[in-house]
Image (spheres, rainbow, N blue to C red):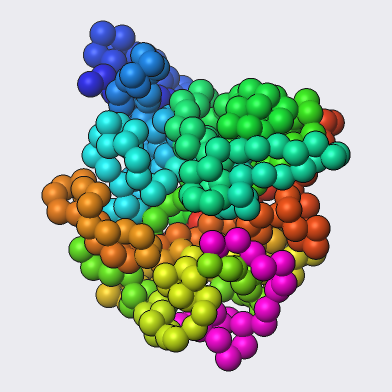
Amino acid sequence: MNVVKRCIYGISILSLASMNVQCKRDNKTADAPQEVTAAAVTIEKSAYGTTPKGEQVDSYKLTNQKGMEVNIITYGGIISSLKVPNKAGKSEEVVLGFSSLEQYMKPNPYFGALIGRYGNRIAKGKFTLDGKEYSLAINNEPNALHGGPEGFHRVVWTAEEAKAGDSAVLKLKYVSKDMEEGYPGNLTVFVTYTLNNDNSLDVLYEATTDKKTVVNLTQHSYFNLSSDFSKPILDHEITIDADQLVPVAATLIPTGKLTDVTNTPFDFRKAKKVGADIEAKDEQLKNGLGYDHCWVLNNQDKGARFAASAYEATSGRLLEVYTDQPGIQFYSGNFLDGTLPMRAGGTYAHRTGFCLETQHYPDSPNQKDFPTTVLNPGENYKTKTSFKFSVK
């Protein structure tokens, strides 16, 4: 497998052996001995595989000086690996994933994927715009889920590397054709991953359309901050800055009303272990088989702000999520059932990973009182979420 290390910010790099290229430093000749300095950030590109349609899939590894490393593949825009240091300084894997493209192409619970056109569920796979009803594929009976069976998680994105100060940047692009998976309009989507030297990973979503449509993009990584994927996430301490919940019926479609989290298992305004209330006798927990709900984030008029955090005491890792979105879906891995293979042997068991998906509320196209997800021609869809890692 050929790997290319590119020159970033004028710092010495390795290139393909046949090229024998060096980056010149100021006031030194090309023949003078060169001092090798570690790059602030690096981006490495490598071949990852080929789809049955013959599409080349690439992998990009973004690294920084603080020991954080993110691998992103162009199939589904998937974060296939994310390594961050623990309190002892050891950098380890913290997201669930697979070891091959073939496994990602098989049915799986959206490990690490970009989700679109519409994250979460749409009731009965139908919605209406300007009096016209649109029908979507039913892939989560009786509803449409995460953009359909061939959503953004199942396509190959084009990729472009970029530089932005002391950050490594990967910009992905996909054009979703009019009526793809039942959604109207040709939708041009950009998702930009930016790895910063403060151990934060920014995800910027942008989109434009030539016809009125609905859009709700998100990122679907499963985290286990212990890095021990045989261990449930029930001891992780979760905080969610939300006074209200979007309650759902048995089909996980919102009832249309928002409820206060006070004195319920859904109150995470103060840090609480996932397992503290997850087995409580509660109708909402029963409907989700645990936590699989959207919280109504506070301070929605403030733009980007703190939304949620997760802390794992053994490793000392802390994950903080910042977003400008109105909601966040906290999912406690209730449908992981021990059938999916880990990277190095074994399988992912029940509740061994959790998701914090920033987004609009489920079924918003059919809920007149929810914030709108409609995108019109001439408008720019733009939203940003940051995942910041540290230790304590």
Q: Position of residue 201 (x, y in %)?
A: 50, 50
Q: Is residue 247 visible?
A: yes
Instruction: Give the quarter of the figure containing the N terminus.
Output: top left
Taking depth in this image into account, of 312 and 197 the one nearest to the observer is: 312
Q: Residue 326's image quarter?
A: bottom right
Main structural element of the magenta stretch: helix, strand or loop? Answer: loop
Q: Is residue 270 magenta?
A: yes
Q: Is residue 14 visible?
A: no
Q: Residue at x 26, y 8 (%)?
A: 18
Q: Is residue 226 above or below residue 323?
A: below
Q: Residue furthest left?
A: 345
Residue numbers of the magenta segment: 251-272
Taking depth in this image into account, of 223 and 278 the one nearest to the observer is: 278
Q: Residue 24's image quarter?
A: top left
Q: Position of residue 244 (x, y in %)?
A: 66, 76
Q: Residue at x 30, y 31 (%)?
A: 101
